[in-house]
Amino acid sequence: MKTKMKRIILLTLLALCSLPACLFSQVTTSGTDFWVSFGNNYVPSDINMQVRIVASKTTDVTFTFTETNTSYTFNVPAGTVYTRVLTAAEKASVHATGTAISSKSLRIQSTEAVSAYALNQLNESTDATNILPISNLGTDYYHMSYRGVIRGQTVYKDGYIVIATEDNTEIYEGSVLKATLQTGEVYANYRNGDATGVHITANHPIAYFVANECVYIPVGTAACDCLYQQMVPVNAWGNTFLVPITKRGKERVRVLASQDGTVITQTGGTIKLDNGNYSQNSLALNAG
């Protein structure tokens, strides 16, 4: 009898720059239909929001803003990168600022397969994410993030954003129904602390984004950064990962389990995790 391999998700958290690098073996970023929304940065206003389209074949691309029901189409030549810096009105229509249901989403559609990326930037706080096509979305997600920073009376929040790709999409956190959404609608949820391990499910495929306003990685460093990353569904997780090496010589890694009794083997020993639990380690890695 074959033993079913248990799946995990791994994030490498890079100190100071705070950019999660996720390794997924069963997901492609190439497609023709995408959804995206933007979360908070440490200052809620004046965020630079960009969308970038990478085309291997000449293609027409259409941006449709759900809240305003406006769209425009442009051409991207083969082998080029198109960068769209969102206007103030466009930013307002895709910025999910608080715990609420809204229509703050952008749909990206193309006539040929492209890859799409989103950038959330402020002075000294920047993060970017790939955007997954609808064909690679799912209904079962776990949150992976970090503890929001507390500075005096200011508490920065961790959060998530989900976008419905079909009508009558029910969003559950654990067993609690949080929202029922129509196509293109957004449910955002922000909270104090670290929401890592929160389990989000839906009855139809959703786009799921981590949206943390400000973190210190590791805790106690002198500068914060936002975290902004689209997550992949559990069915696309794997069980073998390579951790990229930076010049800092130490990598901060979080591993989260989707099933009880998951045994994690790494250089130096093993870890046992249950469903929704995570382990964090600082690994000293050499490029040799």
Image: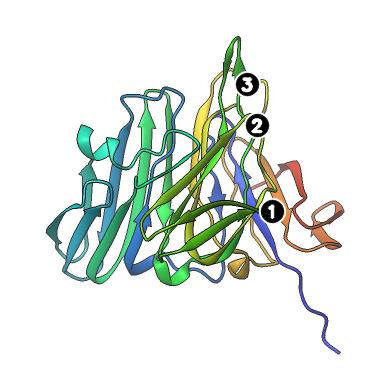
Can residue 59 be seen at all in this image of the molecule?
yes
Please name the amino acid that badge 1 sits on.
Gly
Left or right: where 56 falls relative to 123: left
Q: Residue at the spot x=45%, y=64% of the render?
A: 168
- Image location (x, y in percent) of residue 282: 73, 39
Q: Which residue is mark 2?
A: 147
- Please tell me which of labels 2 and 3 falls first in the chain: 2
Nearer-the-camera pick, 281 or 122: 122
Can residue 17 be seen at all in this image of the molecule?
no
Q: Secondary structure at mark 1?
A: loop
- Which label number is shown at residue 174? 1
Query: Gap in Å between the C-alphas at discs 1 and 2?
Result: 20 Å
Nearer-the-camera pick, 55 or 236: 236
Q: Which residue is mark 3?
A: 221
Please name the amino acid that badge 3 sits on.
Thr
Mark in front: 2 vs 3: 2
Q: Is residue 242 above or below residue 192?
A: below
- Please tell me which of labels 1 and 2 falls first in the chain: 2
- Please tell me which of labels 1 and 3 falls first in the chain: 1
Q: Residue at the spot x=22%, y=55% of the render?
A: 63
Please name the amino acid that badge 2 sits on.
Arg
